[in-house]
Image: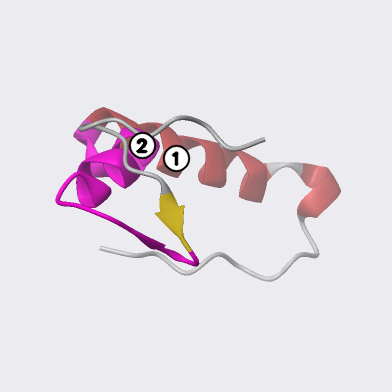
Amino acid sequence: MAEAADADHPLPVGTQLIGEAAAARLAEKNVLLTPSGRASALAFMMTLRADRRYKDAQPLPLVT
């Protein structure tokens, strides 16, 4: 079911969003845009990497 369009949240057309609000709409869901979000994600990845159940997994690339 499609949601109603408004000025802040335009309806999608294919894979593209209509309007200038597209970047803002995508940024609302992207926790990596904030310093605290990046720190939380890094802490989660390091904890997962240190977990014994995943010790044979490939190492995670460190993105700076």
Check if mark 1's residue and mark 2's residue have beta carbons within 8 Å: yes
The residue pinned by badge 1 equals 41
Q: Which residue: 44% across, 40% down? A: 41
Q: Position of residue 38 (x, y in %)?
A: 32, 41
For the point 80% across and 45% down, which residue is it? Answer: 52
Q: Amino acid at mark 1?
A: Ala
Question: Which is more N-terminal, label 2 or label 1?
Answer: 2
Residue 16, picture quadrant: bottom left
* Numbered tag placed on residue 31 in the rendering: 2
Q: Residues within 10 Å of mark 2 (few under 14, many from 20)?
A: some
Report the disc number at residue 23: none
- Quadrant for residue 47, please give it: top right
Which residue is pictured at 85% across the width and 46% down the height? 53
Q: Circle 2 — which element? A: helix
For the residue pair 29 and 2, the one nearer the viewer reads as 2
Residue 43 is left or right of residue 5, and the answer is: right
Label 1: how many residues lie within 10 Å, few (<14), some (14-19) or many (20+)? some
Instruction: Give the magenta-colored segment's residue range.
Output: 14-35
Q: CA distance from mark 1 to mark 2?
A: 8 Å
- Position of the N terminus, as image quadrant, is top right
Q: Is residue 29 left or right of residue 24?
A: right
Query: Between tags 1 and 2, which lies in front?
Result: 2
Residue 63 vs residue 29, the one in the foreground: 29
- Residue 56 vertical placement versus 35 (above, below): below
